[in-house]
Amino acid sequence: MDFLEGNLELRERQRLEGHTDRVWSLAWNPATGVCGIPAMLASCSGDKTVRIWQQGPSGSWDCSAVLEDNHTRTVRSCAWSPSGKLLATASFDATTAIWECVGGDFECVATLEGHENEVKSVSWDASGSLLATCGRDKTVWIWEMQPGNEFECVSVLQGHTQDVKMVQWHPFMEVLVSVSYDNSVKIWAEDGDSDDWHCVQTLNEASSGHTSTVWAVSFNSNGDRMATCSDDLTLKIWDTSAKASETSGSSCGSWVTQYSFYLDLFCDARDKRRHLCTISGYHDRTIFSVNWSRDGVIASGAADDAIRLFFESKDNSVDVPSYKLLLKKEKAHDMDVKLSAMESKGT
Amino acid sequence: MEPKASDTDDFLESTVLLDEAQYEEGFKDGYNDGLGLGKEEGREVGLKLGFQVGEELGFYRGCVDVWSSAIRVDPGAFSARLRKSIEQLGELVDKYPLSEPENEQVQEMMNTMRLKFRVISAMLGVRLEYEGYPKSSETDVVDF
């Protein structure tokens, strides 16, 4: 599909109603929607519950489960494990709950405590064995899943000087990205295998980064690009590909190829990411969410209730990629529009 | 060679330099008073800070000792990662330079210990604190 040709339209397929307070986030179950398995979606809300929606044979969506009586405050974020068997829900009540799907019913199998206050985001790594959470207490926590659905705290990462809004793992490398109210994006990696996690790079104003709160981050499916969105009204695209560094005298001998699964050399993770381009002039209100679809479309959700879609334009003569606005859907929702895989949600 | 001051100059000198002499005497008095007061205040601040540091270190030492005893009784009840973390916290407490309050690294060492303690607390699933335990965040407005 060539997105740059012709008129594109974003049409609302169905409005999912049920939550009694604002919906903060949603997540598609990665093990569904393929091979005849009906697509499954989880949404989390200020009403302290998480709702599971499934697409029926007629194509319409129904609420198949409500995860309630667990969190005592807003559920801010949710994420499915890569296998689709577990759902992590992060809440303002400072806990993260892990739910297991057992024959259509969801059971809370673990509760991760440790954050001092509101947890803002949760993310599973590609292997499904590591979980990252972040919150208003300025820390990022890394947890490792043990046999029997037990979770052990691996590390608490300090570095951000303000509320951390979102964490996201690289699609296949064990590298974690966090974004914060302190305007910076931090990259975290492990030193060898010793549970010693460090901030290997900080993308701030000096590195052509954002000049206000960074709200979200999204990798493309290849993992060689990353998009961040901010209160400074811009989207920034970063090059996150694993390629040889220009600096000579580096002690790192061999370089890990882009498609390798484990980042063995600690120094490979350092200073790898650089600013590629800034998409500005399209938003006049805070951009709360950004999502990069499998087909390469970047969707943004902003405080002006609109969803905008961007795609990389190929017809440019400069080395740096540039992005074109494909369409803008006004009045799509109330604030905090969050998109995943080309479908959207709101309040 | 300059001529020495004669006697006629000396008796006038003390009158002429009177206010300067008075100033110097006043300054000396004030300085000495200040030395005394400052030392007293410094002592109070030092005692207070020293107590806080000692209290926190002692708290970690106590926790590590209890946990280490529990590990000796039943090592299997604790995961390898947990045992290692408790050991590391114990080492950090030992390494803290108690007699070097002006060592620049003490703040960082304290932060490392607090972080390690939080990780262990999370792993054990306990919430241990004492009155006056330093918290990293202040209560403020809830945002998005």
Image: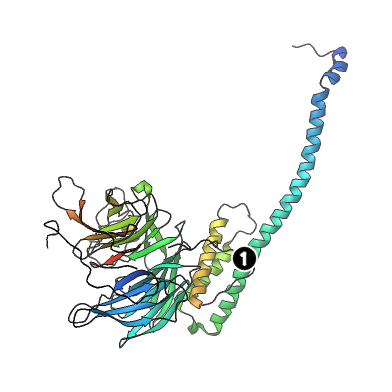
> Going by the image, does A49 lie left or right of A278?
right
> Going by the image, does A100 lie left or right of B54?
left
Q: Which residue is mark 1?
A: B56
**Label 1, residues with CA under 10 Å away: few <14, some 14-19, many ≥20:** many
Determine the residue positioned at 51% across, 61% down: B141
Determine the residue positioned at 53% across, 85% down: B74
Q: Nearer the viewer, residue B41 or A337?
A: A337
> Residue A93 in the image: x percent, y percent?
48, 72
Q: Is residue A342 above or below residue A101?
A: above
Q: Is residue B51 above or below residue A63?
A: above
Q: Colour mode? A: rainbow
Where disc 1 sits, the SS reads helix
Total labels drawn: 1
Determine the residue positioned at 83% across, 23% down: B18
Instruction: Determine the residue located farthest toward the bottom in the rendered image.
Output: A103
Q: Is residue B15 above or below residue A50?
A: above
> Residue A80 in the image: x percent, y percent?
32, 75
Instruction: Determine the residue located farthest toward the front in the rendered image.
Output: A331
Assign the C terminus of chain A to one quadrant of the image: bottom left
> Going by the image, does A167 lie left or right of A224?
right
**Residue A341 appears in which quarter of the rendering?**
bottom left
**Residue A139 appears in which quarter of the rendering?**
bottom left
Q: Is residue A251 visible?
A: yes
> Residue A203 in the image: x percent, y percent?
36, 52
Assign the N terminus of chain A to one quadrant of the image: bottom left
Q: Amino acid at mark 1?
A: Glu
Q: Disc 1: which chain? A: B
> Residue B59 in the image: x percent, y percent?
62, 69
Q: Is residue A190 visible?
A: no
